[in-house]
Amino acid sequence: MTPFPPLPPPMPPAPSLEEDRLAALQRYELLDTPEEPAFDQITRLAAKLLNVPIALISLVDRDRQWFKSRVGLPVRETPREQAFCAHALRSESLLVVNDARQDDRFAANPLVTGDPHIRFYAGAPLRTAEGLTLGTICVIDDQPRPALSPEEEETLRDLSAMVMAHIEARRAVGYLHPVTSLSNRFRLLADIDALLAASAGEERTRLTVVVIDTAASQQYAELTRVLGQVCADAFEVDCARRIAACLPDRTRLYHLSPARFACILIDRHEDELTATLDRIGDAIRSPFHYQGVPIASSTGIGFVHHPDRPGGSVELLRASTSAAHQSLERQKCWCAYDEDQDRASHRAFLLLRNLTDAIGGTRVEASDAATGREGQLHMAYQPKVDLRTDACIGAEALLRWTHPDLGPISPAEFVPLAERTALVRPLTEWVIGAVLAQIARWRRRGIALPVSINISMLDLGANDFADRVAAMLDRHGVQADWIDFEVTESALMTDRAVVDRQLDQLRRLGIEVEIDDFGTGQSALSYLKDIPATAVKIDQRFIRSIATERSDQIMVRSTIELAHDLGYRVVAEGVETVEAYDWLRRHGCDFGQGYLFSRPLAPADFEDWLAAGAFRPAAAVAP
């Protein structure tokens, strides 16, 4: 089936309390879950009893309808603006469309004009006890049909009740954590909502949600990997016992995820609250012993007060979890929810989400750089200058992001975020593709300069990185020796053997490698020994005050001598003054890069800079 095109006419406004409805839909954890026989049996029964070719259990999300179960329809979801079921959310009982082609709401709908050619539709809302509609159970025919008989309407309502009964039973079964038998996240959210509803008319009832992380996620994963799941389960049970012993009487402890717990405290004074949190912190920090082996872990405790922080259960849990993350990062026993810190985390999430759109929305411009068009992402090029001849010997390609609302975003902010997600791969591919397209354009115009592209150890940690680079070189008609890669150390690197294989493959392709930001990483010297590089790039923090700071002079001079003895060329970045330029020339540095020569330039400006001739500072002293 071909993808559904967008529907031109807008759908009716979403129902009131839409955010509450969506929050309820998330709490039931039905979206994007595997097929389940109980739901499929109900759907097949609906198709058989009502004699239709298509029957669906449809869940209406923010921008899509997703089918938990389906008969007669191959797709798993459709856009919400095309969904008949989105209209059914407003229906008190059933929504019945006898002939969609004769209904102004649906006549132009792609589901009517194209596959699956809907003519008849009948849907019964799936409504929770709170009156929130999750979606529908619906039946569809490609032929118009008369109105349902009273018996058929009753059948569809009964089927809706069966679906909701199974949904509620499914939810109830999932209220206990399998390891500790404590109430889980679903029970916590339900209890918070119930407490908020019960205290709605009371004066200043304060509810405090506390989240306790007993280990950082990486620590827990390492514990499981090294000592096994039995040990990890024992760790969780021991943590639950320790925390429960610190809580006030009749306070329920919840087990949210492998190393995360929570509790709800009501109307506790600040001194009583802090004393409780201190006890929990002390209890968890004591080493956990497994078969005589002491195991220490990090601890993060965060809390948020309601009504100081408004919102329902989902928002309160999110805010207290944010505070627990802050506690882990700052290595503090506990942290209260900090709106400023949370705003920064929200910005990071927003940037990651928007970066995904920016990569996709700029993909055409990256492959068609010859037109000079730019999307949100674009490349700038900073010249590299031979310090002996003052000739430009290449450029470094630098990624830039101009956000449509936030303006320019520094790579120092968004690149580290991308490296912590799956975005690092498409972002690197976009950069390499954009640079190769620009190099091809320059070569056609007679500009024959190598360009450096920044990659990280995370890129090299992919088994197919060198193969993908080779394919992109072929696609753009660029020779391997027209580029080089500047490699930076990454604390996130995990498999050094894979990295070494990828570096060897790149060198066999003919791509040179530079060690970037040399002198700042924990293993800078080992890089000189282990990485098949041809140049080292001295970090700008050592260059900016090179003319006056003796300690910087000693380190830079020693680095130049060491690199030359090992056969490397040396590049100094951050050259901003004539004095630094002169010092570097006198001490044999090969190349320089920095604002003294030029800021990073758009491709056209870089061409103009080249046309102006080689750079040589007027006040420079001959070596």
Image (cartoon, grey):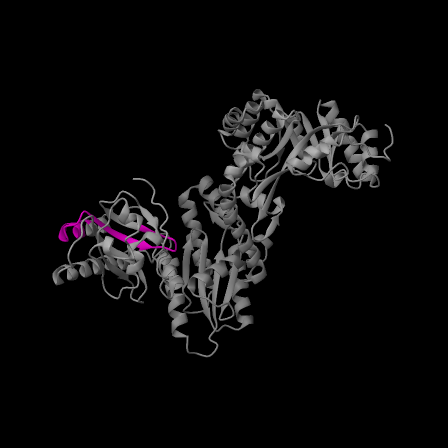
| Residue 374: percent from left, percent from top | 57, 41
Res 452 quadrant in image: top right
Judged left or right of residue 222, residue 443 is right
> Which quadrant is the C terminus positioned in?
top right
| Residue 120: percent from left, percent from top | 20, 53
Asked whether 49 falls inside the magenta stretch, the response is: yes
**Whether residue 331 is situated above or below residue 518 in the rendered picture:** below
Asked whether 3 falls inside the magenta stretch, the response is: no
| Residue 166: percent from left, percent from top | 24, 57
Nearest the camera: 234 or 8?
8
Judged left or right of residue 584, residue 280 is left
> Which quadrant is the N terminus positioned in?
top left
Q: How many marks?
A: 0
Q: Which residues are magenta?
A: 44-66
**Residue at screen point 30% across, 67% down:** 131
Say if residue 51 shows up in the picture: yes
